[in-house]
Amino acid sequence: MTSRLSPQSTNRLGFHYFPDTHHYTESDLRIWLPELRAFGAQWLTLLAPPDRAIPEPFISGLLQAGIQPVLHFALPPAPTPDPAELGLLFTSYARWGVRYAILFDRPNCRASWLASAWAQADLVDRFLDAYIPLAETALQAGLTPVFPPLEPGGDYWDTSFLLAALKSMQRRGRQSLLERLALSAHARTNERSLLWGVGGPERWAAARPYYTPEGQQDQCGFYIFDWYLAIARAVHSSPPEIILLSVGSRMKSEERFSAEAITRHTEENLALFRLARGEATSADEIFDLEPLPASVIACNFWLLAASADSPHAPEAWFQSDGSTLPIVGVIRQWEDKPTPETPIEEELPLPTFDEPLPPENAHPIEHYLLLPLYDWGVVEWHLDAIRPFVLRHHPTVGFSMAEAMLARRVTVVGGEGVFSDAELEKLRQVGCNVERISGDGTSIATQLEVL
């Protein structure tokens, strides 16, 4: 695979690894390192258990591949963790080559605290009572402490929490910590436009905590870093490094059969993926994104993979059954496009679900069950007939011919009057293995039973 990065650009691309601490074996590394390399990833957020180290071979394997781990110690702020207990872990990680440690997680959320602790006054200062000793221990060990990601908005408005925390550190005389502190931010799209909040408080001056007037925008989008960096500059003149977490558009479990949701998820994440990779964007593309400032050092997408029983499983780009979300195949196809230095007769267009994909498509969907969709809706007996088949084979179910082109195998429900032979031939031309099922509900159910 050829990198499309220019020499002047900076690659900040990364991912969140499994949302648990059970996949740090050498066999896990052998599975996932090739995928990360293929994407060109240079960062990986790992959940770090507080009572044991992630095995050194796993950490070393990432570092040798040029991937910097970002360790996230998602600790509760109360009871206060003992810095001495974590100091040895910090020292080991620093000796192995780890540079960044995120301490705590979303302290501006009620759910992160015991009910009695949340109700007390001076929440920010009480959090800093727990945070500062751990952050200084990390500094002494050779790590860069990262201020935890705050929930955008949150029960305690995140921009207010961050401003109060940084001012309190300054007031406490922790200038050395402030100078070396990095920030993190949840850069989810939150179903807003990709450009939501770009420009920060300087552009959206009327936005206030807990209140965003009509016609204004706030920090609750991908460009949350514009807001956080403005807050940091107001307290400390040097802009800190910032690591973006939870980047991108997410796939909800109830949306996996929606062509519109799949298209949105794919298009938005592809645009952000290219931005994180440092690729220039042209004016004729779907999104005209503002470039990332130099302070943004990592752009970690949610989510690389998850176990089948994880509540985050539908959001994983690589599914536990071996299939992938369509974004993976589209990125692979985009990566395989000729670079400008490659002599070609005509530049291939950006693939979308509104046009056929070329024959070299990587077929990110293993099996697609294509159903007819009429102007008045879906035939209910079709849904009844396919239920046993879906439970047995777990295909992706949808109504889009363009989506079906992403699948290795396509089972078509409907006769010539619904899906013509010419349409099925287009599927075969892009490498799909196609089978047609037609008839009434009972006939369809019987035919599906033998597949």
Image (tube, helix red, strand yellow):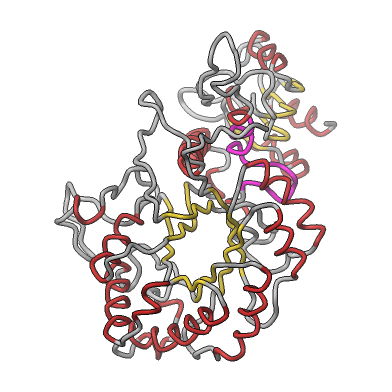
Q: Position of residue 276 (x, y in %)?
A: 48, 44
Which stretch did the figure color magenta? 317-332
Q: Is residue 237 above or below residue 35?
A: below
Quarter of the figure with residue 382: top right
Q: Nearer the viewer, residue 171 or 397?
A: 171
In the displayed structure image, the side of residue 193 where residue 333 appears, left or right: right
The verdict on residue 331 being magenta is yes
- Percent of width and height locating residue 3: 60, 34
Q: Position of residue 406 (x, y in %)?
A: 65, 28
Task: From this view, report whether residue 402 is shown above or below residue 86.
Answer: above
**Residue at point 19%, 54% (across, down):** 202
- Position of residue 139 in the picture relative to residue 316 (left or right): left
**Residue occupying the point 31% across, 74% down:** 161
**Does the magenta portion include 430?**
no
The answer to whether residue 51 is above or below residue 259 is below
Q: Position of residue 351 (x, y in %)?
A: 54, 24
Quarter of the image that includes the C terminus: top right
Q: Quadrant of residue 242?
A: bottom left
- The N terminus, quarter of image: top right
Q: Nearer the viewer, residue 311 or 105?
A: 105
Which residue is most to the left?
206
Please name the residue shown 66% across and 57% down the image.
306
